[in-house]
Image (cartoon, grey):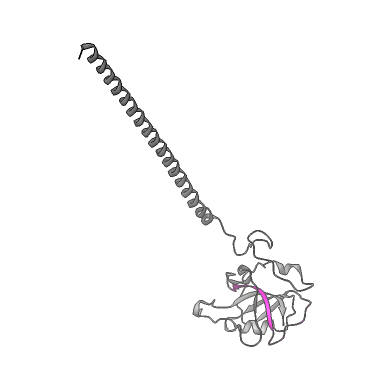
């Protein structure tokens, strides 16, 4: 073979090798670009997940840190988050729609005392009837609240005068007119006693009771 033909073949081989090298380089660049794109997407997904988790973690902290209303300052009926206003008897004083502020008493309580706060215009409660009430109960000595139907958002219904409730209620509420609000100052022996057995409040008690219905 002539020297000229050998040179031509050599140049052709070099060109083919250069083309293959260029194609291989392009393929490597394409793969690298693809991997880079995948990496960017993965980073973005990770960022969104972390941000989402942090956003979800913040909500319980804000709720847990929200102050709650004190027992003697309930939300107004009808306000967001407030319990529904009680169903009042026809012609009842609108004040029965608001939880009363009940404080403690003074001195030594030796007998059951019933003090009318709002005079109702309905029929008088009789022994054996089931009455529906809203009430607040506090310790007579210091006014510390231990029970309230207002805070549960649900009036309480029970038979009266037949031993189903404490003696102070049985004796203090019979004869009270529907639509009334009364204060019951009850000595320990007509309430839960003096030892607080079963986690019940011990000593003399004070209740403010609204009579909403009787039947």
Which quadrant, please, contains the N terminus? top left
Task: Please state the total of marks drawn on the protein image.
Answer: 0
Q: Quadrant of residue 167?
A: bottom right
Q: Is residue 133 magenta?
A: yes
Q: Nearer the viewer, residue 15 or 171?
A: 15
Which quadrant, please, contains the C terminus? bottom right
- Asked if 186 appears above or below 19 in the picture, the reply is below
* Residue farthest to the front, as pictured: 1
Taking the image as shown, residue 1 lies to the left or right of residue 128, namely: left
One can see residue 184 in this view: yes
Q: Residue at x 27, y 16 (%)?
A: 11
Residue 193 spot, x, y in % from top left = 54, 82
Residue 68 spot, x, y in % from top left = 57, 59
One can see residue 111 in this view: no
- Asked if 157 appears above or below 13 in the picture, the reply is below
Start and end of the magenta stretch? 122-140
């Amino acid at each position: 073979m002539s020297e000229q033909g050998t040179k031509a073949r050599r140049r052709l081989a070099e060109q083919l090798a250069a083309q293959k090298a260029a194609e291989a380089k392009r393929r490597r660049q394409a793969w690298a670009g693809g991997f880079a794109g995948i990496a960017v997407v993965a980073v973005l997904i990770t960022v969104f997940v972390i941000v989402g988790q942090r956003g979800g973690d913040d909500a319980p902290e804000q709720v847990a840190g929200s102050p709650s209303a004190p027992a003697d300052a309930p939300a107004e009926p009808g306000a967001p988050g407030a319990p529904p206003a009680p169903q009042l008897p026809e012609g009842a004083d609108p004040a029965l729609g608001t939880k009363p502020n009940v404080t403690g008493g003074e001195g030594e309580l030796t007998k059951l005392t019933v003090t009318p706060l709002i005079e109702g215009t309905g029929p008088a409660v009789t022994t054996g009837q089931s009455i529906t009430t809203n009430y607040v109960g506090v310790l007579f000595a210091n006014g510390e609240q231990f029970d309230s139907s207002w805070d549960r958002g649900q009036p309480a219904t029970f038979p009266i005068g037949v031993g189903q409730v404490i003696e102070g209620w049985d004796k203090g509420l019979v004869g009270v007119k529907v639509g009334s609000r009364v204060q019951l100052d009850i000595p320990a022996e007509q309430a839960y006693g003096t030892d607080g057995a079963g986690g019940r409040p011990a000593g003399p008690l004070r209740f403010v009771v609204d009579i909403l219905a009787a039947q």
